[in-house]
Image: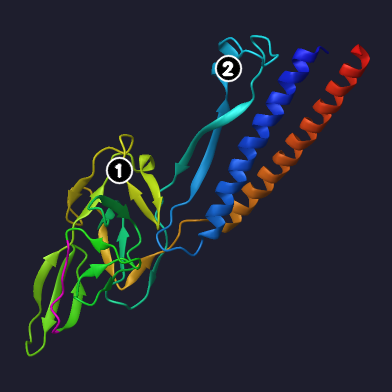
Amino acid sequence: MSSISLNALLQVARTGLLTQQFSIESISNNIANINTVGYKHSRAEFSEILSRVMQPPPAGSNRAAGQAAGAGLAANQRLFDQGQIEPTDRPWDLAIVGEGFFQIRMPDGSAAYTRDGGFRLDGEGRLTTADGYYMSPEIAVPPDAEDVVVTPAGEIMVRRRGETEPQTIATLTLARFINPAGLESIGDNLYNATAASGDPLVAEPQVEGMGRLISGALEQSNVDLSQEMVELISAQRAYSLMTRALKNSDQMLSLVNQMRG
């Protein structure tokens, strides 16, 4: 076996370690967020690095053209399967059943999107997320509101003190995307629109393909713990195998160098 092919084997083992490390990190993040409201699990997808096989090897790589280059991260796909709906009996907890995202206004004025419907009122009666970001469009509840109802169609109805009949003060709108997997995660359970996701399509719940709302409930994480544990064990075993391959390749390369010397 030549030193060139041994270097190629080292490269394959190296890329294998990197891909399995990313896979373990992705799975661990899913498990850590199993109790995060509205969290959507991600799945790392890999592919053979064909471009490096077809193109001349980089200068100084000691690898001949046509040799294997290992595997690389193809995508870290976010899966937006429906999570389980659990009642909370808090009127401002909202769950979406079906497609759609709540629209959030960030401090810099930009738009973000979330499936986390754990809303609350600030000191001025405005609807915010748990982190203090305002819902968009902004919704303010009168200070004398006593009973609150949010209908499946997004109508916010309140009964004010001294009145007997509730009144509609606003109607929530949702946003959906042609390719939600293309959304960019920005932390705090929020997403940004990208060229891959497409522009948001905004409409009221139960209109133009939007899901319906359930008041007094939250959508739980869609992480399947048993499946994640199986994938974690598989990734750890693959990582261990790549570590062994890297060690054996290094030992063989050292032996070849000694024989040459």
Residue 38 x, y percent position in the rendering = 40, 59
Quick one: SS at disc 2? helix
Cα separation between marks 1 and 2:
32 Å
Q: Is most of the magenta stretch helix, strand or loop?
A: loop
Quick one: SS at disc 1? loop
Residue 122 x, y percent position in the rendering = 25, 74
Q: Is residue 139 left or right of residue 81?
A: left
Between 132 and 160, the one lying in front of the other is: 132
For the C terminus, the image quarter is: top right
Which residue shows up at 90% across the image and 21% down it? 255
Classed neighbour count for the residue bearing mark 1: other residues with Cα under 10 Å, few (<14), some (14–19), many (≥20): some
Residue 65 x, y percent position in the rendering = 64, 9
Q: Are marks 1 and 2 in contact (CB under 8 Å)?
A: no
Classed neighbour count for the residue bearing mark 2: other residues with Cα under 10 Å, few (<14), some (14–19), many (≥20): some
Q: In this view, does 139 lie above or below 211?
A: below
Which residue shows up at 22% across the image and 48% down it? 209
**Identity, as a three-letter code, of the amino acid under mark 1:** Ala
Q: Name the residue under label 1.
A: 193
Between 28 and 247, the one lying in front of the other is: 247
Q: Mark 2 points at which residue?
A: 52
For the N terminus, the image quarter is: top right
Q: Is residue 37 left or right of residue 10?
A: left
- Splitting the image into 4 quarters, where does residue 205 fall? bottom left
Of callouts 1 and 2, the N-terminal one: 2
